[in-house]
Amino acid sequence: EVQLVESGGGLVQAGGSLRLSCEVSGVSFDGYAIGWFRQAPRKEREGVACISGTDGITFYGDSAKGRFTISSENTTNTVFLQMNSLKPDDTAVYYCAIEKWWGSCPNPYGDKTYWGKGTPVTVSS
């Protein structure tokens, strides 16, 4: 059974940093795409950053470029999202997702994509 557990969210002031973690069990990263998504109240789910578990190629959404960094530790099946220069607009619940796919990003609407329960991030102004 594939399980994802996110951690590291919390309350931070604008300009601060947080590091999110996603521990994945039930699969190894090779052959999988892993991504971070977020959803703010009354907004659509948004792709933040993705990484290929096979070759480490990354992809960033426009809101994350230059501020966030995704990385993976294949020995522990953990994916990280380092978030710097946080803004109030970054406030959302952040979800980790994984899909068996040779690309970098899991399909957020795919029926073979597994999700964690999310970790909330609140950025105060």
Image: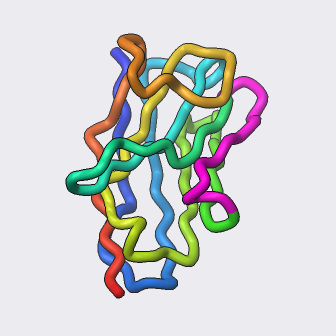
Kindly identify the residue that appears in the image at 63 percent across and 67 percent down.
67
Q: Residue at x 63, y 42 (%)?
A: 72
Q: Position of residue 103 (x, y in %)?
A: 68, 22
Q: Position of residue 25 (x, y in %)?
A: 42, 27
Task: Check the picture and name the quadrant holding the C terminus.
Answer: bottom left
Residue 73's x, y, as percent?
64, 42
User: Is the magenta region chiefly helix, strand or loop?
Assistant: loop
Residue visible at 57% across and 46% down in the picture: 49
Q: Is residue 11 above or below residue 111?
A: below
Q: How is the image coloured?
A: rainbow
Q: Position of residue 54 (x, y in %)?
A: 72, 24
Q: Is residue 61 located in the magenta-colored stretch of the structure? A: yes
Q: Is residue 55 above or below residue 45?
A: above
> Which quarter of the picture shows residue 84?
bottom right
Magenta segment range?
Answer: 53-65
Residue placed most toward the observer, 28 or 48:
48
In-front residue for pair 15/76: 15
- Taking 82 as reference, is 46 left or right? left
Q: Residue at x 51, y 84 (%)?
A: 15
Q: Quadrant of residue 116?
A: top left
Q: Give the residue at the far left of this rendering.
A: 42
Count how many numbered circles sit on residues in the image: 0
Q: Is residue 7 magenta?
A: no
Q: Is residue 64 above or below residue 33?
A: below
